Image (cartoon, rainbow, N blue to C red):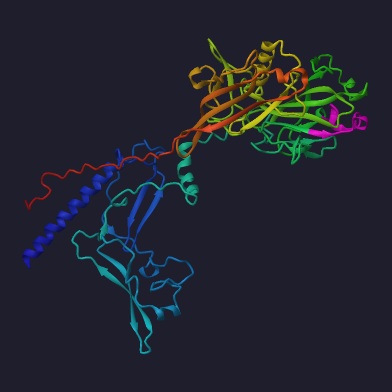
């Protein structure tokens, strides 16, 4: 008995030594290279279960040094919160009795038909604990031959000398891996980590001048208007609905819009009476600077008026004589009809509208016309940044539906127009659109949207074949044809390596005497670039394919035949399959002291 007591005393001393060594190792690991997460995880071992709690780490960032904590005095484990008889691992279907699952609370009268218990015992704690609760389930047969359930909950003792009887460190024995964000725990993780990712601005900072008493708009808010009586309304911009007919739709803050729609008119009656044709309809607008009740009123100012002649030429009106610009019917045409409207709204960093202007194009419409096409645009410009030099189509990757960013290469870098519509464009199909007779309607190439359009070619004389060929190529390419396209939607102009040159592929021709381009097709290859969770669209290649006629054009001369000329664009994804990158499992270089087995060795 004395020998056994001595051995037990030695083992107890050895166990205390191991506990202190493990605690020191955990403290070193927490403060060292293995602490790769921001929160500290508290691992509390109880009599019947193990519970993890997540709390933000002190200091705010993951690189903050963690002060060494003194070891607490050994104490007893916390009291159990979950009993073993409330656990049932074999209960797989909620609300239904699982066959032979004796601990399933849904099983009442079904127990008499059980043949055995699929789970004989349930333990609520770890096997490392010296004692824990265990629930036992057995079946016995009654006198009638049916099964009866017998259950009992009792304490179980662990005879292992290295079992855990008391805790000597709050953090426990290990630090578990951080939880991955899911739909259920995202809000909790966001609250834990958000303060470390973004530093909140000081609430007592002075607001910009003129906006202290005005609550501005946020992205997507509807713009508000007011009339002379103080009645509030919503600012609308016409656009196509289910049909090409113009329908008023509300305008949202910071959402640039461009739409083209048609109106059915009888100009003999509507020329001077239809408000949609008059300049005053688009200029007599009072916008509200913000959403609050006492927001300032911002009138829409007339920035410019361009008059279109019957020949299609434009001239800017400089005398400002707005009173003489009402629609009027003269010589079988309705003059001063609004055909284009462009709004420009300036806003400050607080989201309040500080200035609004409109530019109009007025033109003549034949009295016999039954459809009137109108173009409407609205742009938002931040006041602090002045005029927008360039328009982006993504940050950084392209966004589906926005125009490609294109420019021309010079010795100083890339140059591009400030007009977002003066980019890579295609012909817009229209009724009776002759390729050699302008003006031609065009639309920008929008990322991710494939399209096909064109015009009709009728040759009256093929004597000037080279002139016709060059003229037709210019029509297919459009004015200010770019040479390069940005690989990302926000590429800088001074980094020419981020721009992709447009390659030209002209098909061989066997025509005799004259050759002209019959179609222009753009093949745009793009890929997903960046992280697996948030890939960005990147253009890697763009090729211009021009097809030339392979037969004589004599059959097209004389105006007896019409040949279609087509322009098209297609987007080809070339992304490689995404492969998630996983970090290697860390290895632990555990070293024991040289006298670890003393006094046994």
The magenta region covers: 262-281
Image-based side of 405 in relation to 109, left or right: right
540 shown above or below 162: above
The structure residue drawn at horizontal position 37% and vertical position 36%, both measured from the top left corner, is 64
Image-based side of 57 in relation to 389, left or right: left
The front one of 441 and 335 is: 441
Q: Position of residue 461 (x, y in %)?
A: 74, 14
Is 599 inside the magenta-drawn segment? no
Image quadrant holding the N terminus, namely bottom left
Determine which quarter of the picture holds residue 246: top right
Q: Position of residue 360 (x, y in %)?
A: 79, 23
514 shown above or below 332: above
Q: Position of residue 385 (x, y in %)?
A: 62, 22
Image-based side of 277 in relation to 114, left or right: right
Q: Is residue 169 visible?
A: yes
Determine which quarter of the picture holds residue 130: bottom left
The structure residue drawn at horizontal position 83% and vertical position 35%, both measured from the top left corner, is 227
């Amino acid at each position: 008995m004395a020998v056994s007591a001595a051995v037990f005393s030695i083992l107890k001393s050895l166990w205390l030594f191991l506990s202190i060594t493990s605690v020191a190792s955990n403290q070193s690991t927490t403060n060292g290279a293995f602490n790769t997460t921001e929160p500290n995880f508290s691992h509390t071992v109880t009599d019947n279960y193990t519970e993890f709690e997540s709390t933000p780490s002190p200091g705010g960032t993951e690189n903050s040094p963690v002060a060494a904590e003194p070891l607490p005095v050994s104490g007893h484990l916390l009291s159990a919160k979950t009993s073993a008889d409330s656990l049932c691992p074999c209960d797989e279907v909620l609300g239904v009795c699982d066959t032979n699952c004796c601990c399933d609370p849904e099983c009442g009268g079904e127990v008499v038909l059980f043949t055995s218990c699929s789970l004989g015992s349930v333990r609520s704690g770890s096997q490392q604990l010296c004692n824990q609760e265990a629930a036992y389930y057995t079946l016995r047969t009654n006198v009638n031959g049916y099964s009866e359930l017998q259950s009992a909950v009792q304490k179980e003792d662990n005879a292992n000398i290295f079992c855990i009887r008391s805790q000597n460190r709050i953090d426990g024995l290990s630090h578990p891996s951080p939880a991955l964000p899911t739909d259920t725990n995202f809000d909790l993780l966001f609250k834990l980590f958000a303060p470390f990712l973004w530093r909140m601005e000081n609430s007592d900072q002075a607001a910009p001048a003129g906006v202290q008493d005005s609550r501005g708009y946020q992205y997507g808010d509807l713009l508000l208007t007011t009339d002379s009586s103080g009645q509030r309304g919503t600012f609308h911009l016409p656009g196509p609905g289910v049909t090409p007919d113009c329908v008023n739709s509300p305008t949202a803050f910071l959402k640039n819009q461009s739409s083209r729609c048609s109106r059915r008119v009888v100009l003999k009656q509507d020329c001077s009476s239809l408000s949609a044709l008059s300049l005053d309809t688009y200029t007599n607008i009072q916008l509200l600077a913000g959403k609050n009740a006492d927001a300032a009123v911002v009138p829409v100012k007339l920035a410019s008026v361009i008059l279109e002649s019957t020949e299609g030429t434009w001239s800017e009106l400089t005398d400002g004589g707005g009173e003489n610009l009402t629609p009027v019917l003269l010589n079988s045409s309705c003059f001063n009809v609004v055909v284009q409207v462009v709004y420009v709204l300036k806003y400050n960093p607080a989201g309040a509208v500080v200035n609004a202007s409109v530019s109009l194009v007025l033109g003549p419409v034949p009295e016999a016309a039954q459809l009137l096409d109108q173009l409407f645009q609205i742009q938002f410009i931040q006041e602090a940044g002045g005029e927008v030099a360039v328009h982006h189509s993504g940050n950084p990757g392209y966004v589906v539906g926005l125009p490609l960013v294109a420019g021309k290469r010079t010795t100083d870098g890339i140059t591009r127009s400030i007009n977002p519509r003066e980019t890579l464009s295609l012909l817009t199909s229209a009724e009776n659109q002759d390729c050699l007779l302008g003006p031609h309607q065009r639309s920008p190439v929008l990322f991710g949207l494939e399209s096909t359009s064109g015009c009709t070619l009728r040759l009256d004389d093929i004597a000037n074949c080279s002139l016709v060929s060059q003229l037709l190529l210019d029509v297919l390419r459009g004015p200010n044809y770019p040479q390069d396209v940005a690989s990302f939607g926000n590429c800088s102009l001074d980094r020419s390596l981020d721009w992709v040159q447009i390659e030209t592929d002209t098909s061989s021709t066997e025509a005799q005497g004259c050759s002209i381009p019959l179609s222009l097709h753009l093949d745009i290859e793009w890929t997903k670039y960046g992280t697996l969770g948030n890939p960005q669209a990147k253009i890697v290649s763009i090729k211009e394919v021009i097809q030339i006629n392979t037969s004589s054009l004599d059959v097209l001369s004389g105006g007896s035949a019409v040949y279609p000329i087509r322009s098209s664009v297609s987007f080809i994804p070339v992304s490689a399959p995404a492969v998630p990158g996983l970090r290697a499992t860390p290895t632990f270089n555990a070293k024991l002291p040289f006298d670890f087995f003393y006094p046994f060795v």
